Amino acid sequence: MKIKIFVYVVLFLFPFSGITQKKELTIKEIRNIAEQVSIDEAIKKANTYIKTHKNEPSGYSLLAELYIEKGGFEYFKKAEVYLDRALRINPRFIDGLVNFGRLKILTKDYALAERFLKRALRLDPNNINAYKGMMELYQKERNPRVLEQLKMYLERGKLSADSSADIQLMLTRAMIKNGELDKAEKTLVNLKKKFPENPVVNLLLSDLYFEQDNFSEFSQYYLNGLENLKDKNELERRFLDMYEIMSDNEITEYKRLPLEKKGAYLVQFWKSVDVNGATEENERLIEHFKRLKIAKTIYRSPIPPYYDDRGRVYIKWGPPDSRYLKPMGTILGNELSRPTESWSYESINKNLVFDFVEKGGIYKEVRDLSEAIVGGGIITSAVMPDGSPNPNLLKLATLYSERSNLSSLHNRLGNVTDWEVFFNDIQESNIIKETAKKEVPPSVSKYEFPFSPMNIAVSCAQFKGENGKTKIELYYAIFPEEQFFEDDTGTEIIGSLDNTFVIRDSLLNIIQKVDDKSEIRLKKGMDLKNVTANYQRNFLTSPGKHTFWIQVKSKRAHKGGIIKIEKNLRDFNTNRLMVSDIEFSEKIERADKPDVNVKNGLRISPYPFGEVYKDKPINIYYEIYNLRYDKNGNTNFQIEQTIKPMKENKTIVERGIKKIGDLLKGGQQEAITSIYRRTGNSINDFEYVILDVSKITNGKKTLSIKVTDLISGKSVETSKDFIVK
């Protein structure tokens, strides 16, 4: 009976033992807790782990690793205790040696760190973490011997190419910084073959090509690498390179994005600020990195971002229009001021000026130059209690007087006639300078086109195209100069133009690019003063937001021009009543042969200008789509043509002043309207008429065309702004 009871109790309790028994966590699972929950929680689990695995070094090394991650002197001491236990159990334990090396780097015991890491590599020449530790050691200590040892390991094939990609990338980054460009290029080209889509490989190639002045390749590889970059540390590095020229809203938006979308956002930023979208290169990107290099070289600082306030200003707005340098300071009575610099950007904003004072070995931007006075500070009054001028104010006047020719602000402060006025002017100038910084954009490009500027007039119009596409017609005109033309013994002079047309989609990716040449043929001896050469280019593309870039160059004259047009292309692939844009033309005539400017049997010579002259009538052309038939198979529609003053964004006061001015002039004609009816036998029609503006008052006008289908009762309208002269 007793035996039966004992068996019964054992059988009764046994099932519950499985319920109360807790699963033991592995080293990998504890690391996951550190990453996904918290380091403190992982430390608790690691302490539990070593209680049941007292003779295993891995638990002690893990606990030390977690304390290293927490950081700080107290936790570093604990980490050293646990690493010492791990290596007592197994002096050849690789993770323990590597972690000891990392710990010694953090505590700046670089010699001991090198010993631990080299020992780990001797025991396991393929250990990636040991190589990373050595690379980290080099980055902290900048000991060239360490770098050479890493190169030696790789050259001897100690690591397989696949497993050592990260290490090779670290090494090539160091090689590029050290100017070992040929070695870096060889390594990166091999990595590119094996890992063609690796974003960091592409970014380091871009760094390499920048140092080689191969800016075309730099731009391409940089944007390609950034597009798919998801490495947190690399993203942070690239963001810090460019955040100076981003607006506060852009920085906030970037920081809110998930990791996988950050790289693409930065790419879009660079595409949006490109100053010449007609080329594959991103000129603004290239200009920025040239500025960044100068900032880190000439205006360097020992702490991140490795440039001082002069570098920050230089990155934003480029080289100043003028600068005043006093690197040895200014004699102020019996004292010497701190070294100072002052910069002016009056071409951007007359009040965009900066004063810098050397403090602690680097230059810092200051509100005013009072901080250059040794032992001085903020000046709170113009006079002393006894009524005499504040001596520091006298010294400040000297500092401004010597740079009075730098800017209008400095000139005002450099001519003192009254100390109270001078004191108040200082306070006011500080406010003016801060306001100017807020008014100007966070970055201004000073990109210089490689040719002298050429005047180009451009306009465009969109029509219904084939196969559901929208047809966009670009009209442009150049103003010929004598140097455009070759010497010719015939009756004509002939010049050649190189043209580039680029269409970018809403993401600013290139979807069409055309390079061609065009000729200018004029009669010899013609006066070029009032002559233009007009051209047209047609494109078919999908509806939506597009950016069009036109670049025209005359190599002979070494002149060129760039035009950017942003356009939201309409979708004409519909059954509803629509009307095209209005095209201005200097001449419309019948045409038998197809040509770039022929539509519906008419040759419509482009007129790309925004001005219309009273003594020279202008032709207009537009198309109407999707009219309805009546029961007899005919169309019947009405056209209302109106010319009226252009609406401008004016304040109530400005509108009132304009109205008073109009009354004093005897009143201004508000609008001229013409109404006429048309019939036809096609649902798509076109109109061309001569626009007589001889009786229209000068100024900005809007031509409005309203089409009403008298069969369906539907109406549609289009308009075009122009200037009457």
Image (cartoon, rainbow, N blue to C red):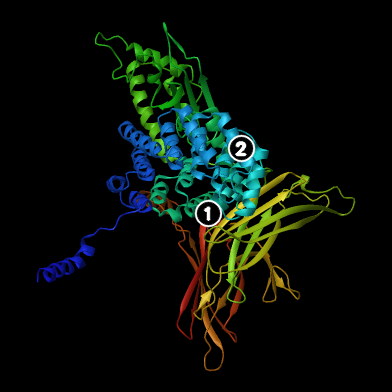
Classed neighbour count for the residue bearing mark 1: other residues with Cα under 10 Å, few (<14), some (14–19), many (≥20): some
Residue 684 occupies which quadrant of the picture? Answer: bottom right
Q: In the rendered image, is residue 441 in sight?
A: no
Residue located at (16% from left, 69% from top)? 7
Q: Secondary structure at mark 2?
A: helix
What's the residue type where badge 1 is placed?
Glu
Q: Residue at x 45, y 80 (%)?
A: 714
Where residue 138 appears, x then y in whole percent? 52, 33
**Residue 469 in which image quadrant:** bottom right
Where does label 1 land, which residue? 227
Residue 558, percent from left and from top:
73, 44
- Residues at marks 1 and 2, CA–CA distance in whole angstroms: 30 Å
Q: Looking at the image, is mark 1 or mark 2 nearer the viewer?
A: 2
Dot placed on the residue nearer the N-terminal end, 1 or 2: 2
200 vs 413: above or below: below
As drawn, the label of residue 151 is 2
The reply to whether residue 584 is in sight is yes
Q: Which image quarter is the N terminus in? A: bottom left
